[in-house]
Image (cartoon, rainbow, N blue to C red):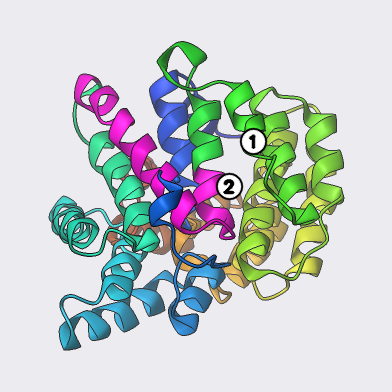
Amino acid sequence: MKAPRKNDDTARRGTWRRLIGAICVVTGFSMLMSVAFATTAQAAVLKETELQALLDAGRADDLEKLAAQRLKADPDDPQAVAALALAQLDLVDGAVLKQNTQRLEQCVQRTPNEGACHYALALALVMQARGGSKLKALGSLGRVSELAQRAMTLLPDAPEPRSALQQYYLALPSFVGGGESKARALEQDVKDPAQLSLMRARVAASKKDWPAMEKALRAVRTQRPELLLEQRVLWSDYGRNLFFSEQKERAVPWFEELLKSQPTQAMGAYGLGRAYDALGQYDKAVAAFERARGMLGAEQLGLDRRLGSALAGKGDKAGARVALQRCIDNRRGSNGDIEDCRKQLAALGAP
């Protein structure tokens, strides 16, 4: 039986890496003061329904295209500036991130009550810091916190900024501005029971209290698209714990539940593929990964890396090479994924 890859777990260790993973997961990359300047309460980060729908669905490519068109027509459109930055957060090209960060800085100055720009800038600064030194990264944490808190004030009913701020607190110890008590305090003003359950699931995950996390996730009942996004991310986090534990078999029905509840979203099928891969059932893993490739949100999941590994596991070297090369060429692939795919491709040898 093939052992699950350990680099996922390793990447989550350490304060800095946990911070990056936590804040960025809400974009999906899934992200945080003064009430005197707050605008009318909104239930989503983006005011424009079409843009928000693409963000909630994880359709990064479509969101990028629409936001770019809007920005071309009006370079000062704050919704387009924020949407484009959110759609491009996971691109490998650092120049794109730099350009978006500059636009967002201008947006925050030009439209100080535009919560979407504050939220997007907080996430962009995290991504930008990830590519620099740890000292520089730690120096940016205060600004990230301020932006996230301002976004939460401007968008009090939007779950994303509150979730990002909660993750920020959970990722950092209390002596540098984080801590569980601050994370729990954010629950006080939450009226939606589903959002509250998701926040409690996140706190449980930070403590590795897996039974509490499962209980909280099973309590979620919602049709809000932005909460469905958080639900599938947290559901996948719990499932990942299962296939890295002695309970690998439980991961299969766990992800089948996600796939049943959100049948158009790729994350359920992707998780199911990873669960089968962890069990060494490569034919089923490949089928699940291939299914996920045609579903919503697939472009942001690093599917080809996993598909290539599963194809190699079942002895299909030719298919594995094709998938791994797609992984290397993927403009949304992380540097870690691309490096791993190159290593896997080299290990397969010449055709």
> Are the residues at dot 2 and dot 1 in contact (C-beta closer than 8 Å)?
yes
Q: Name the residue under label 1.
A: 2
Task: Return the residue found at the far bottom.
Answer: 73
- Indicate the amino acid at tag 1: Lys
Helix, strand or loop at disc 1?
A: loop
User: Residue 61, position in %: x, y?
Assistant: 37, 74
Is 226 displayed left or right of 69 in the figure? Answer: right
Residue at (35% x, 48% y) in the render: 123
Q: Callout 2: few (<14), some (14-19), or many (20+) C-alpha neighbours within 10 Å?
A: many
Task: Return the residue found at the far top.
Answer: 175
- Indicate the amino acid at tag 2: Gly
Vertical relation: 212 (above or below) 280:
above
Residue at (53% x, 77% y) in the render: 53
Nearer to the camera, 147 or 297? 147
Write the start and end of the magenta stretch as one range.
135-164
Q: Callout 1: few (<14), some (14-19), or many (20+) C-alpha neighbours within 10 Å?
A: few
Residue 151 magenta-highlighted = yes
Q: Is the magenta stretch mostly helix, strand or loop?
A: helix
Q: How much space separates mark 2 and mark 1, taking CA atoms?
A: 8 Å
Helix, strand or loop at disc 2?
A: helix
Residue 204 magenta-highlighted = no
Q: Mark 2 points at which residue?
A: 313
Task: Using the image, tell me which numbered label, if any, was put on residue 318.
Answer: none
- Residue 318 in view of the camera: no
